[in-house]
Amino acid sequence: MSSPSVRADLPAICGGQPIFPRLFRFVQPSLPPLETVLRRYESVYSQGMITNGALVESLEGAVAERLGVAHCVAVSSCTSGLLLVLRALGLTGEVILPSFTFFATGHAVLWNRLRPVFADCQRDTWTIDPRDVERLITRRTSAILAVHVYGNPCAIEELSRIATRHRLGLIFDSAHAFGSQYHGSPVGRFGDAEVFSLSPTKTLVSGEGGLVTTNDAVLARRLRALRNYGDSGDYDCKVLGINARMPEFNAAMALAGLDSTDEKVQMHNSIVSTYTAGLATVPGLSFQSVRAGCVSTYKDYSAYVNPAVFGADRDEFLAHLAAENIPTRKYFSPPLHQQTLYKKWASREPSGSLETTECVSAGVASFPIYPSLENWTISGIVTAVRGLADYYHTKAD
């Protein structure tokens, strides 16, 4: 990609020269060398064992050791992992979850014929608010399904105390969080289970795939049966399962990339530091807060656009950046409770105000972040944003 141009007096959408001569990728998967993957895969391929075999078992063992957890169960996706965990726990009634999350979190609840109850998020971390969780608990509540949004660890200790006090299941949607840390401990050790995604935008990539980690041997055994149609090995199904097995090629890819995940997390955090150093003083922009002692993978780097201060709302802001050939996303907008599928659930008690969620979601703007993103590209994005801010403030004057 060609380097960005010198900032014109006007933003591109107003007739100025675009910062970037052409659109570039919002995400670029960081993949292990193909020859390394094929070296691992060759032996199982030649034996004809191409799904849920030796490489899957090796991946499960390596991840369990890395995270310091008793069991790891590989599945076909994070979504299937969430589906199966909720099924394996035998939940009924209501599950409390954030509305500020990806579809899969809510879908796992509905697929299990459970009722979603949406909790608000915290204004600084954008993760589920434990105080709102406790307010929403009723006699029908069976579990809390929390999310490490963008890889930012949520309030694990507070949620654990609430779950214990009310005898509730506690599951973490850790799709974004492979490599995150909570007060020195790897995310993956907490709650009844945590579920990771290995899709192309994540720090650990298997193409498609997921991992469930747990310290519960009974739960792990149930999950292994559930991912294989419900067959625990005796060809006599005792539970209703699905095909959620991980192919050996996907396991080979994940194994080949496992040792580089810490480096990827460090690179993401370095990119965030560069972004924030250039954008922190821009009026009307604020950023997700990571608690002291925690490490986020920053699967996404997002800003909150305050239209009253910045001079433009989030959608205008993104339209201006698109004219500069800068790709962006709105993760997650609209939130679940405002989507057609979920509106009927959000309109019923005991769900209350989701004011913070609606505020954050209406203002969130996600920027490109991946290890191969070059510093001059980040500088060009920063220049475009600062130039846009200057334009609006000059216009206001």
Image (spheres, helix red, strand yellow):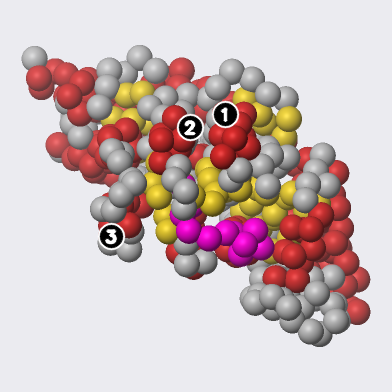
Q: Position of residue 4 (x, y in %)?
A: 39, 34
Q: Is mark 2 on a helix, strand or loop?
A: helix
Are the two marked residues, 3 and 2, in contact with CB atoms closer than 8 angstroms?
no
Is residue 329 in view?
no
Disc 3 marks which amino acid? Lys
In magenta, the rendered stretch is 86-96
Q: Is mark 1 on a helix, strand or loop?
A: helix
Which of 365/1 is in front?
Answer: 365
Is residue 124 in view?
yes
Q: Is residue 209 magenta?
A: no
Disc 1 marks which amino acid? Glu
Q: Residue at x 79, y 58 (%)?
A: 218
Q: Is mark 3 on a helix, strand or loop?
A: helix
Left or right? Give the position of 213 relative to 363: right
Query: Which corner quadrant of the image does residue 394 belong to?
Result: top left
Left or right? Give the position of 312 relative to 163: left
Q: Which residue has dot 2 on it?
A: 130
Q: In this view, does 188 lie above or below 337?
A: above
Q: Is residue 16 above or below residue 253?
A: above
Q: Which residue has dot 1 on it?
A: 158
Query: Which corner quadrant of the image does residue 266 belong to?
Result: top right
Are the two marked residues, 1 and 2, in contact with CB atoms closer than 8 angstroms?
yes
Q: Which residue has dot 3 on it?
A: 344
Q: Is residue 94 magenta?
A: yes
Q: Distance between the residues labelled 1 and 2?
A: 7 Å
Q: In which quarter of the image is the C terminus?
A: top left
Q: Where is residue 369 in the image (x, y as percent from the top left)?
A: 51, 39
Q: In this view, does 245 lie above or below 254?
A: below
